[in-house]
């Protein structure tokens, strides 16, 4: 920035100025020099009246004129590097320059960053080739239909957060993420862009890590079902809903029996342990423990009804809580598996399906409301096939 003291030595010749500077840097007192050379300035500002240093090899990026800097005082350290300024425009060679050109450049950089992030998001989550309808598995078909049911006429799905699609929100989110990975679900373009811009302009959310930002953008954007019937365009939601419903009603003809049984067992396992989600049992639990728990439930389901299995989980959990430490989650899981050797009584829990997915499974596939809660899951399934 140009100072206002640069014209003060105009009454002196170049030689006089050189001499003045030389005497100043040799250490003569400012007051003596000011009086002798008849300079109208406060003592401390004398150095500011000296001619600037022009850096011929350092040019302003905007107007290509050499930058200049002021002389440093005789007492300042030799390692001090004076700031450099442009002679013609307002540019300053400092960390954050506030000249109009630098401001513009920063703004442009920010916009470019947002745009390139957008491009990555759009490529990964929006502009994805639709998946052929005939490639969709039984479980995925049922899950999609469940997603479509609350608001079937809309192209976008945005209410999966409010609905109990699977027992507990955590399971729903996991299933949604898996379908996004498999490209069956994509995000609505406009919504994704809006959320990306929001996160870039909003001070509070800028402090999130990049992974948290992506999660924020994804989980606040509307989903679209990325399935095609004609091999090109995404099939409309209402058409897809009708199609899925018709095909699922005839599931015993249209889908593999083993796939349906597997889906049924997974669902029953989910239902049986849903109580534990309410109790925060899954907080700080290892992946292998979850697997063991599921395996234990599968063992129980061979002997007990789903309603009884739920009761056993409940009873073992109460025991686990009562005994607290060192009674670990592992022991709890083992106790569930070996239930009949350890205890005789168990509580019975609700016979109602916990989630939308179960309800659809009962009504559409098993063609009952919730009878299978009171029967052995395997036997019930066999009966369904022998009908
Ligand atoms: Zn310049
Ligand atoms: Zn600048």
Image (cartoon, grey):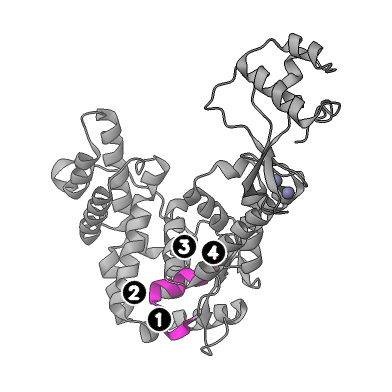
Real-space Cα separation, disc 2 to disc 4, in angstroms: 34 Å
Image point (57%, 55%), residue name: 217
Which of marks 1 and 2 precedes in the sequence? 1
Image point (43%, 67%), residue name: 181
Task: Sort mark 2 into few (<14), some (14-19) or many (20+) by Cα contacts within 10 Å.
Answer: some
Q: Which residue is mark 2?
A: 260
Judge whether residue 163 is colored magenta: no
Point out which mark residue 293 bears.
Answer: none
Direction front: furthest residue: 15
Q: In the displayed structure, would residue 347 be above or below residue 25?
A: below
The answer to whether mark 3 and mark 1 are in CB contact below 8 A is: no
Q: Quadrant of residue 325?
A: top left
Real-space Cα separation, disc 3 to disc 1, in angstroms: 23 Å
Real-space Cα separation, disc 4 to disc 1, in angstroms: 36 Å
Residue 203 in picture, x, y percent from top left:
64, 42
The answer to whether mark 2 and mark 1 are in CB contact below 8 A is: yes
Image point (26%, 29%), residue name: 324
Real-space Cα separation, disc 2 to disc 3, in angstroms: 20 Å
Q: Which residue is mark 1?
A: 251
> Does the numbered disc 1 mark a residue whose Cβ is under 8 Å from ligand 2?
no
Point out which mark residue 176 bears.
Answer: 3
Residue 372 in picture, x, y percent from top left:
36, 64
- Taking depth in this image into account, of 109 and 115 the one nearest to the observer is 109
Disc 4 element: helix
Q: Quadrant of residue 383?
A: bottom left
């Amino acid at each position: 920035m140009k100072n206002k003291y640069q014209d003060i030595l105009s009454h002196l010749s170049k030689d006089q100025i050189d001499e003045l500077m030389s005497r100043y840097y040799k250490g003569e007192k400012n007051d003596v020099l000011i009086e002798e050379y008849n300079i109208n300035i406060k003592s401390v500002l004398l150095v500011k009246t000296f001619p600037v240093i022009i850096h011929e090899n350092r040019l302003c990026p905007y107007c290509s004129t050499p930058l200049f800097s002021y002389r440093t005082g005789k007492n300042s350290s030799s390692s001090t590097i004076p700031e450099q300024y442009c002679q013609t425009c307002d540019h300053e060679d400092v960390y954050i320059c506030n000249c109009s050109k630098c401001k513009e450049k920063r703004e442009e950089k920010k916009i470019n960053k947002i745009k390139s992030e957008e491009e990555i998001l759009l490529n990964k989550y929006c502009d994805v080739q639709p998946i052929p309808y005939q490639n969709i598995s039984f479980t995925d078909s049922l899950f999609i239909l469940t997603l479509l049911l609350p608001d079937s006429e809309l192209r976008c799905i945005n209410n999966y957060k409010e609905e109990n699609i699977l027992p507990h929100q955590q399971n729903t989110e996991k299933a949604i993420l898996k379908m996004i990975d498999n490209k069956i679900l994509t995000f609505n373009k406009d919504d994704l862009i809006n959320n990306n811009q929001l996160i870039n302009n909003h001070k509070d959310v800028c402090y999130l890590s990049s992974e948290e930002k992506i999660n924020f953008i994804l989980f606040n954007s509307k989903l679209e079902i990325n399935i095609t019937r004609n091999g090109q365009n995404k099939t409309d939601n209402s058409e897809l809903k009708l199609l899925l419903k018709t095909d699922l009603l005839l599931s015993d003809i249209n889908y593999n029996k083993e796939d349906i049984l597997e889906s049924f067992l997974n669902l029953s396992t989910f239902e049986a342990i849903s109580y534990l989600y309410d109790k925060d049992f899954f907080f700080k639990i290892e992946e292998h423990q979850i697997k063991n728990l599921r395996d234990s439930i599968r063992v129980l389901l061979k002997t007990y009804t789903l309603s009884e299995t739920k009761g056993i989980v409940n009873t073992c959990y109460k025991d686990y809580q009562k005994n607290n430490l060192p009674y670990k989650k592992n022991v709890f899981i083992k106790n569930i598996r070996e239930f009949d050797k350890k205890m005789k009584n168990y509580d019975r829990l609700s016979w109602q399906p916990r989630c939308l997915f179960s309800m659809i499974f009962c009504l559409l596939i098993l063609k009952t409301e919730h009878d299978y809660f009171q029967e052995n899951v395997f036997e019930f399934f066999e009966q369904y096939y022998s009908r």
